[in-house]
Image: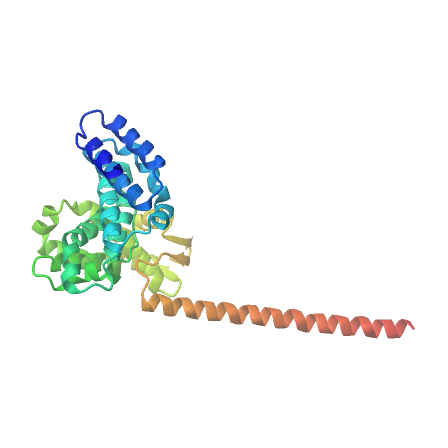
Amino acid sequence: MAKLISTKISQQPNDKPAMRLKILFNLYNLLEGPDSRFFVYMQALNLALNGKVIDHIVPSFKKIDSFLKEWNIGVKDQRNLFLTIANVLKENKSSGKDSFKFLTKYLATFSGEDSYVIGEAKEEAVRAVIEFVKAPDTFWCDLLDMPAVGQLEKDAKYALVYQLLKIFLTQRLDAYLEFQAANSTLMKSYGLVHEDCITKMRLMSLVDLGSNESGQIPYALIKDALRINDDEVELWIVKAITAKLIDCKMDQMNQVVIVSRCTERIFGQHQWHSLRLKLATWRGNVASLISTIQANKVVEEGSQAMQGMAIR
């Protein structure tokens, strides 16, 4: 009955959509069965999207994790849910980052599937890559680790899209400029703005320098890698700090940047190995500190005992 009612309510999304959405929410709250609740919620999502009243349903996305536990739905239903939410958020220009998050959740559900099933996600994988490249404030993602995205690498139509993603996540500005020069028409076909891509790649190149230059980056190296003038080096360092990509100090006297923290663009085997080394060093330093404290405590106690004997 609930399915029949909710389907009827959502059939005319352009006729008082806000009121229809409110009725669906009330119906949802009256229901107890998880299957019926999930069905009604999906109807509400589609009504919000088609009726262009997405602002009314966006606040509920914060509760999706608890909803998933309650509904206990299968993988196919999860895919439908995540993709629909991503589409809803895409219509809201201020929610691009959240749209990308749910799109990656959708793609992640294809891990472990065979190539035929993974093929269903090909278009959305391309969309995710383009959304990542376009996003001016997103500098990290795990798309390269997803089979749904990995299938693009050897795809005749989309191999260049995969190559572009790899450049943004593993290479520097010079690689992007070379790619753009050879594929400018492709870039334009996806609505990618060359100047915006250069800005993002400059920041990501600076991040890469911070990860690979032993904590110190000469100004001259930044100038060459980012293809900028001498007087622009500190400007781009400040931009990277503002974007929370790096924590550093600028040594103007010696013309170097001293990096204390740097965001990783990807987190693969190399990053795990680096993290293990840092943790091992930290453990060693803590153990050494504890040993020093204990040794000093023994010396101090011995000294106090000797003083006590001398007083007697």
Q: Residue 196's image quarter? A: top left
The figure's colour scheme reads: rainbow
Query: At x 69% / y 71%, what residue is drawn?
Result: 296
**Residue 24, position in %: x, y?**
28, 33
Q: Tell whether 310 sits left or right of 59.
A: right
Q: Quadrant of the C terminus?
A: bottom right
**Residue 305, position in %: x, y?**
82, 73
In the rendered image, the vertical position of residue 46 relative to residue 279, given as above or below: above
Q: Tell whether 290 sits left or right of 241.
A: right
Viewer can see residue 71:
yes
Viewer can see residue 254:
no
In the rendered image, the vertical position of residue 69 relative to residue 282, given as above or below: above
Q: Residue 96's image quarter? A: top left
Query: At x 34% / y 59%, what residue is drawn?
Result: 264
**Residue 191, position in %: x, y?**
14, 44
**Residue 76, position in %: x, y?**
23, 53
Query: At x 90% / y 71%, what residue is drawn?
Result: 311
Choose between 236 and 104: the one closer to the eye: 104
Choose between 80 and 300: the one closer to the eye: 80
